[in-house]
Structure formats: C-alpha cells, structure tokens
Amino acid sequence: MLTEQQLADFEKLGVIRLPGAIAREDAEVMGEQMWNVLGQFGAQKEDRATWVEIKQSKFKKIIDAGAFNKIESATVCAALDELFGEGEWIKPDVWPSGILFNIPRDEQWDVPTGGWHIDSPVSLQTHPLHFLAYFTFLNTVKAGGGGTLIVTGSHHIVRDIITQPDARPKIRSNDMKKILIRTEPWMQDLFSDAAFENRIEKFMTESISENGHALRVMELTGEPGDVFLMHPWLLHTSMSNINDTPRMMLLNFMHGIPD
C-alpha cells in the first residue's frame, strides 16, 4: 500500500520511488541474465573494455522465457492497484517493455537541451491517468550514472494546456514542446542552447513556473530492486553515463483498462 506521502508525491511531482519494491537478490539475478546475453557479444562483466550496447531485439528470447517476470512483485502490483484502481490495469503478456543498458562514456555531465519528450499523446480522454511508466533498477545507479532525467511537476503544466477551452483534442510530444517554449520561460531555457553559467544549478534546483507549479530536473538513481513509477505527462529524457559501471534498468509501460 502506498503511503500518504507517496500519493502526495505522485500528485505534486508526478513520480513515486518504491525502495526495494523488487527483492534485491531477484534484481541482481535478472542483472546476471542480462550479462549472459551481453556475453554472447563478447561483453565480460569484469572487463570494461568489452562492454557493448546491443539492440533490444537481442534480449527478446529471455524476455519471452520469463527472465524478468520477478518485476511483477506484490509491492508493484499493489501500487498499480492504488493508482489505476484495483484490477483496473492491464497485465502485460511479457515483462518488461524495454531494456535500458548504458555503458560509461568519457563526456562532461550537464543538463541536456535535447531529447525531452512525453511518452504518449495528451488528450482529455487520457486524463487523469490512463498509462504510466515504471523503471526497475537491476544494479546500483548513482548520480551521473545514466539514470533517466525527469522534470518533476511538468505534468501539471501539461494538464493546464490540455484543459484550455481552445486546446486541440490531442497534442503530440513535439507539439507540446512548442507550446511549452511559447508559454513557459523556464521550459524555453531548458530546451535552449543558450549558455548558462551553471545549467545543473539552474534546472536541478526547484523553480516556480508562470502558473505557480514547482519544477525541477531530477535524476533517477537507485539500488537493485528499487522502482520508480512515473506519470505519463512528465517530461523526461535519457542521459549519458559518466560513472564506472553500466546502467542496468528495466522499463515497463502500464496501461489502464479503457472505460
């Protein structure tokens, strides 16, 4: 069962962290399954020089065989019941929807200007919650380790836009970004290539939008078995990994049962 604080976080921030939602030992075993597949392409866990990123399709065989089914934990299912309504979400045929494996790169870490998006088109028919994403950590992902970046609070701005009397019935991600650039100076700066003295300080410290919503870029970090549940209207992007270990996570897209 979600706590009052977790429910409040989902409403305010658009994301919930569920520490240890998957048993750590199960998460680590799933991580080893991932390494077994990577090993078929020459990757050795203890030899960074051999690490390689491969196509998602290369994991299909073990996904279909149920290698990652332990992410369907009682804790996760109870949280989905609370957010969608008990029994009101569709259980996937296979888990997960995607594999997130990012090897370290020799780059400077900064808040990016590009790649920001929303996962699904926005419409009043999809309000308030029809879909969410959840991320499962299979290894330790620290700051700078390639964890997804999200803009907490951005789902409120999207909601304000789609509920305007003159709003289009459905707004896709690229069009939503154009609207955000026109209407929200903070978003305009986030997407801009203009130089700021410190983008990390500017965007990873809470700011207040034009309409009074608290916004902040947040990096998803965690330990094996930790889970984040993310609102579908939350702006997010992938990020480079500048640490010494790969990022190993699973991504699931969960859908509510249509009315």
Image: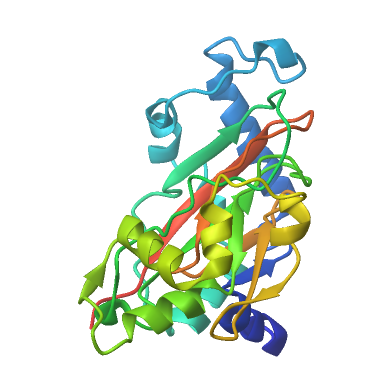
The residue most toward the front is 194
Quadrant the C terminus occupies: bottom left
Determine which quarter of the picture holds residue 66: top left
Q: Residue at horizontal 35%, vertical 59%?
A: 173
Residue 59 or residue 178, whichever sits in front: 178
Give how far across and how far down residue 91 sits, in percent.
37, 64
Quadrant the N terminus occupies: bottom right
Residue 173 or residue 196, whichever sits in front: 196
Asked if residue 77 can be seen in this view, the reply is: no
Q: Does 81 appear above or below 233? A: below
Q: Residue at horizontal 67%, vertical 55%?
A: 220
196 relative position to 212: left or right: right
18 relative position to 62: left or right: right
Give how far across and how far down residue 230 sits, in percent.
53, 66
Q: Does 79 appear above or below 166? A: above
186 relative position to 164: left or right: right
Give how far across and how far down residue 77 sits, in percent.
52, 70
Residue 226 or residue 189, whichever sits in front: 189
Determine which quarter of the picture holds residue 34: top right
Report the coloring of the rendering: rainbow
Q: Residue at horizontal 20%, vertical 77%?
A: 169
Determine which quarter of the picture holds residue 74: bottom right
Q: Does 24 appear above or below 86? A: above
Q: Residue at horizontal 41%, vertical 83%?
A: 160
Give how far across and how far down residue 33 sits, in percent.
59, 31
